[in-house]
Image (cartoon, grey):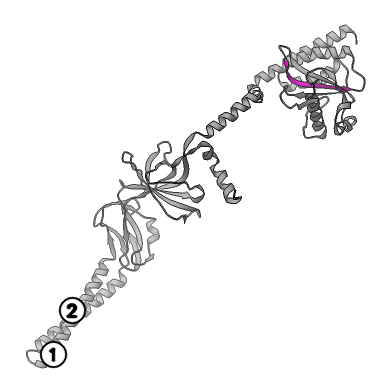
Amino acid sequence: MSGDHSVAQLLQIEQQVRRCETSTDLNFIMVNMTRTLVPYQQAMFLAGNELEKLKLKAVSDLSLVDRSTPFSAWLEQVSAVVNASDTGSKVHVIDTKSWPVELLNDLTEFSPPKILWLPLLIPAKPTQRVGVLLLAKSDPWTEKEIGLLQHLASSYAHAMQLFINRSGWRTWLSGLNSRKVKLGTLVAIVLLGLVPVRLTVLAPAEIIAKESLLVTSAIAGAVSEVLIKPGDQVVIDQPLVQMDRTEFQGAFDVAQRELERTQAELRTVEQAGYVDRRKKSELAELAFQVELKTIERNYLKTKLAQTQIVASKSGIAILDDPEKWKGRPVVVGERILSIADPAKVQLQVMLPVADAISLVHGNNVTFYLDTDPLNPIPFNLDYSSFEPSLTPDQIIAYRIVADIQQDAVPPRIGLRGTAKLYGEKVSLAYYLLRRPITFVRQHLGI
């Protein structure tokens, strides 16, 4: 190839390089268009600076590169060997005789024997590299070809630097490879791990009533109707629940009739006693029967009155769906609903056993409502259950109760959310590694 023709081809390639819009376009020109200047059989471009592992990016006559193929793996191993040698930063024909046996055995299958190592060094910073261009052919390389390729490699490196600078994160990542940065990062991590922080956990929570009055059934029977709705404001002596009174009404009517009959007999005997003195002996027994029937009638009258449950305290009614109580049998003392003061509330937290931490009375608790997560409500821990129990969600958890702070506005009873529990101070390292440490202790015992 004449000198004038070589210069023309060189200028044409550099002009095409200036038109590249992406690094992919530049990679294609490097491995394919370089052939118009210097003939070769195969070209490969590997990206990476002098501190990075070279990675295959482009191969001549291929539109896509698969780094998982045996050829790609072999080529990156070759580049690692050459890059680690003293000639890794210089243009030279690779001496394949010094290769390991496993690489040398695959040479004839993957590449022509004469491979030119062409580092792409940045012109303004000759010690910095953006990649390596490997050119392979069967014939030996001439000094003229190597000279032309060195000049072209400088143009390639200059253009490649532009695309690398556009991706600032690559420069930042390459800077992390320095020993000073790694050592500084390690020291910073150790120091940060010693910073004391409060140990915290999150758990589901619910607002419950404090000092609520339980409304229970005084008799055994079936609920006829619940006369109020959930959340209704109730006052003292307001009817709340109507029990089925059929059985008690019938028993009361019978007892009333029996009492009236006995009283009539007593009056008859009293009148007859004035004529027949023998009748006076029956007065004491009949008087006792009247007293006994009166007691029975009064007892049934009390039970009949108890079929209507009334409020003994003012507040709001807390209960489930009233319709579910209709016709439902209850026993004596069974809870039907409760009455609570809306200004007196507590926070009930169900803390799973897996997340349990050491808690003491008075610890801070922050409650985040599901309906208003941006306005947390402060609480103070009151007590925690001694033993865990099974929740409706089939989770074994400790029941924790917290009191609202005095200056906080009490939320509505029944609202749910997430509670943040604060424990003792620990190091940041323990805070971050607490769960892994617990897992290792529980499963490996070390």
Q: CA distance from mark 2 to mark 1?
A: 17 Å
Please tell me in which quadrant of the rendered image residue 41 appears: top right
The residue at which mark 2 appears reads as 291
Residue range corresponding to the magenta coloring: 127-138
The residue at which mark 1 appears reads as 281
Tell whether position 132 is magenta. Answer: yes
Please tell me in which quadrant of the rendered image residue 363 appears: top left
The N terminus lies in quadrant: top right
Q: Is residue 279 above or below residue 425?
A: below
Q: Is residue 22 above or below residue 12?
A: below
Asked whether the residues under the numbered discs 2 and 1 touch, taking CB atoms below 8 Å apart as contact, a structural biologist would say: no
Please tell me in which quadrant of the rendered image residue 171 appears: top right
Closest to the observer, 159 or 436: 436
Mark 1 nearby-residue class (10 Å; few <14, some 14–19, many ≥20)? few
Closest to the observer, 169 or 255: 169
Residue 127 % position (x, y): 73, 16
Residue 241 % position (x, y): 31, 60
Residue 272 % position (x, y): 10, 89
Q: Residue at x 84, y 8 (%)?
A: 7
Residue 391 % position (x, y): 47, 54
Judged from this view, the residue extending furthest toward the left is 274
10 lies left or right of 2: left
Closest to the observer, 31 or 71: 71
Q: Is residue 370 visible?
A: no
